[in-house]
Structure formats: structure tokens, C-alpha cells
Amino acid sequence: MTTLNPGIALANDTESNDPVLTPIADHAERLAAAEAGVAALAATRNDRWYPRFHIASDGGWINDPNGLCHYNGRWHVFYQLHPYGTQWGPMHWGHVSSPDMVHWRREPIAFAPSLEQERHGVFSGSAVIGDDGRPRIYYTGHRWANGKDNTGGDWQVQMLAEPDDDELTSFTKLGMIIDCPTDEVDHHFRDPKVWKTAGTWYMTFGVSSKDKRGQMWLYTSPDMVHWTFDRVLFEHPDPDVFMLECPDFFPITDANGNEKWVIGFSAMGAKPRGFMNRNLNNAGYMIGTWKPGESFKPETEFRLWDWGHNFYAPQSFATDGRQIMYGWMSPFVSPISMEEDGWCGNLTLPREITLGADGDLHTAPVKEVEGLRLSTVELGSMHVEPNQDVTILDDAQSTEIEMTIDLNATNAERAGLRVHATPDDHGTTIVYDAQTGRVVIDRQNVAHGDRGYRAAPLSEEELANGTLTLRVFIDRGCVEVYVNGGRQAMSSYSFSGEGPRAVQLIAESGAMQVSGLTVHELDSIGL
């Protein structure tokens, strides 16, 4: 076994140790209290921006997607939940499930803090199907080191739970399986991802080393219960990055059968640079190679999963030959307007990750999302004169738009859409910016909340092609934009003003030629 620091292996050789279970509260009572907390917030919830086709809690704050899996004929999505308020607080796990990734139902809250090692929060983790065909849930138990708040740092460990039923509505906690070597770690030690390769189970999670460097550590296990430190899988080359949150690691194959490995993480501490890293923290990936017994070898630079204002902590899982990912639309920049409404935060649509012929990852909504379409109107080609606004929908709160812009016949400086356009002249623009060669979400005129703009790049090949396709999903309080079939993605909140929320075609300082325009009315996912 090769390690960068043999002392880490010595401190964490738990192969012969059984899980440590130390209850401090009745889990059923904690779950019942959490359900009551969510219900109290939901009873007075304001739905002005509450999503129709994005996953959100009935009430309370949510963040990272967790425990994604397909089991016993149902898709399961868990998520970080604070059931007693609309700001971040002691973490629980909420849960929804679906037979088709279209129609969803709420399930009982899955986890509440009830063990000593998770006294202050059941933090993020993942699900994996074992050799026996049954799921296992791995997550991080969180405690404040000083017992009360973050001023003394964190004490975080890895935990294991197993389901009691095939509907995954109840779980038995097995307890702590990996303790934190506090002399090797600067507090952060969390978010396990588990998989199997060549007959061995592997776990990686994010760590801030004692030198405050963002790392991912690798452990191995023969039985999914007893784990041994293997090595540092990856250390971020940027010394400003002190932690790699919500890590992901998976193989992917292109159309020609060439396999690569993808390492994903949310880089805490990276400085803004041009259009890059504009959010508080930024989630992205690197493509490279990995073999058991080695560290990950990157072959690309760090690339963003999503260029919008509000995307963080994505998690993916492999099923039926697909790699499917959800992200959290993170609202960390104040003011967070929906905090006033009894709920806060939602997830993105499910996206399939593919490795394109260009050697990069593409993310587009899974095919199942088309099942949300209630009606379709083909508007065909349209010409928009300079500085003209053309209303195509009077009130769009649950809509998908497929739009193709002929760049060769467009000379506007900015050309595209204005969404959530209300009678008070507020709205959010989604446009191609000819001066930067990028697709922009611009919230400078949004009615509520954070403003600013984000800009996704187009490659030289895409610009030379002369055709730009946009697939835009408009929910009550957010938008998702997929560029050229998922070459880039953008997720942003957009909090509209009062009144109907129109969608307009816009062309600024020049004309726009739209060669194809289709509008789909979307159904609610049932939540």
C-alpha cells in the first residue's frame, strides 16, 4: 500500500474494526420532529417562486443532492435538509422518489442527527448497490469541535446505514466506519463517494489537509464495512483551494469505446479569474486517467460543470449505462428572497453526462424530462428587428423553449430571450453576446435578489458553425440553459416581480434571425 504520508495509513487502518454506534437520541422521535418542522413551514409557504418541475422541500432549507440511486424500480433522490428554518442549519436528509424521473412523490425524512458522531448534522454522502443487490448509504457525521459552533472547527467522520425496506423509507444506522485523523486534517473531512473496480470497493471523500490543501483521499474495503486508507487520490494544484467538497469520481467512455476517468469536486477557496470562479465556491471537473494502486492523473484543466449563478455540490451515479447527475441551485449570495417564503433552495433537472467527440464532457437533461411536456407549439423561423421585443408567451411559469439562432444572419450585439418579463419592466435576459462570443444570463434588471451576469464560452468550432441552439427551462423562480446540446449548461435563480411573466425575443443594436423556435408547456412533477 503506497501513501503520501504513512502516518495517515497507520492512524486510519480500520480494516479490523467494526462500526462504532453511539446513540444519543431516539431516531424515530427526531424524524417525527423534523417532519413537523417541515409541515409548519409548508403550511404558510408562499409559492410565488416555488418550483413546479424542480425538486424542493415542502418547507425549510435544502442543499446538496445525496444518495442518488435507482433501486427496485424507483429513482431515489435524497438531499440535505434543515427542517426548522429557511437558512442553513443542522442537517437532515430529505427524500423523494419516482418511477420515471417525471412524476415524483415525497417520502419520509430519512435521517436526523441521533448519534454522537453526527450530533450537529447528518452531512452529505452517496448510495451504492452492493453485491447482494441492496443499497448502502455512506454519509458524513458532523460535530462542532467546541460543541457549539464553527469557531473551533469541525470534527467529521464517515458513517454507514442500510435500508430496512425496498422502498427506502426507513434505515438502520450502523455507525462510524472511518474516524478522522485530526492530526492530519484541518477540520474538513467529508462527503463520501463509493464504487467498485476490479473486485475491490473504493471510497473517496474531500479533505483539507493539515497544510490546508484541498485533497481527495482514497480508501479500500473487501466488504463495504471495514475500510483501510490507500492514498491521496488527488491534491488540487492551486494552493488557494483548501477543500474539495462533494467529490465525485467515475469512468466514462466515448462513442469509440475510449475510457477516461472524471474527477469532480467543488473547489473551496479558488479565486475569481475572468469569467471563471465567479460564484462563492465553484463546482467543476477534470478528465484524466486512473488505475487501482495509483493516484488520479489529470489531462485537462479544471472546467466548470455549469456557468450559471447558482450551481454547486453536484452528485452523479451510474445506472443502465448512463451517468446521471443532479446539482444544487445554491442561493448563498444575499439577499436570498425566497427565505421569506417558508422554503429555500431546489435541485437542477437530472442531467446525463457524456464524453463528446471534442474530448469534453457534455451535460443535457435526461431523455425522461421530455415526459413533462403537456403541449407543443412550433413557431418556426422568426426575424427580430434591431432593438425590437417580440412577446412569444404572455405568462410562462413552467415552460421549455428550444431555439436556434442563425449567427450568420444575425448582427445584433446581443440576441436571445427575456424571461420572467413582468409589467413593471423587470426580467432576466438569456442572450448570445457577439462581443464576447459567449452565452449570457444577465440579471441586472431582475426584480428581486442577487443580480450580476454569468457567461458560458463557445468554442471556435461552435462559433464557426454559425448556428447556436439554446434549450431553456423556465420555472417559477429559476432558469436552466443548455447550449448546443449540452456543450455548456447554466443554472440561475430569477425572482420575478408581480403579474404575468412574459417571454420575449430580443435583439439589441442589430437584428436576430431565429431559424427554429419551439415552445413546450411543462407539467408539474407532483411535489
Image: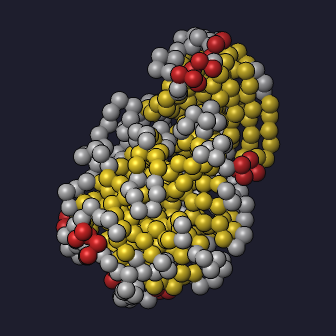
Q: Is residue 2 left or right of residue 210?
A: right
Image quadrant for the N terminus? bottom left
Q: Quadrant of residue 18?
A: bottom left
Q: Measured from the top left, where is residue 58 in percent x and y?
A: 56, 64
Q: What residue is at 44 percent from the left and 67 percent from the top?
A: 203
Q: Measured from the top left, where is residue 406 in percent x and y?
A: 67, 18
The residue closer to the viewer here, 346 or 302, is 302
Q: What residue is at 68 percent from the left and 35 percent from the top?
A: 401
Quick check: can you spot residue 328? no
Q: Is residue 490 above or below residue 58?
A: above
Q: In this view, does 443 lie to the left or right of 472?
A: left
Figure disc tally? 0
The residue closer to the viewer here, 444 or 347, is 347
Image quadrant for the C terminus? bottom right
Q: Is residue 288 above or below residue 442?
A: below
Q: In this view, does 526 lie to the left or right of 293?
A: right
Q: What residue is at 37 percent from the left and 86 percent from the top?
A: 16
Q: Measured from the top left, where is residue 417 in percent x and y?
A: 60, 27
Quick check: can you spot residue 435? yes
Q: What residue is at 60 percent from the left and 54 percent from the top?
A: 323
Q: Measured from the top left, where is residue 508 in percent x and y?
A: 55, 15
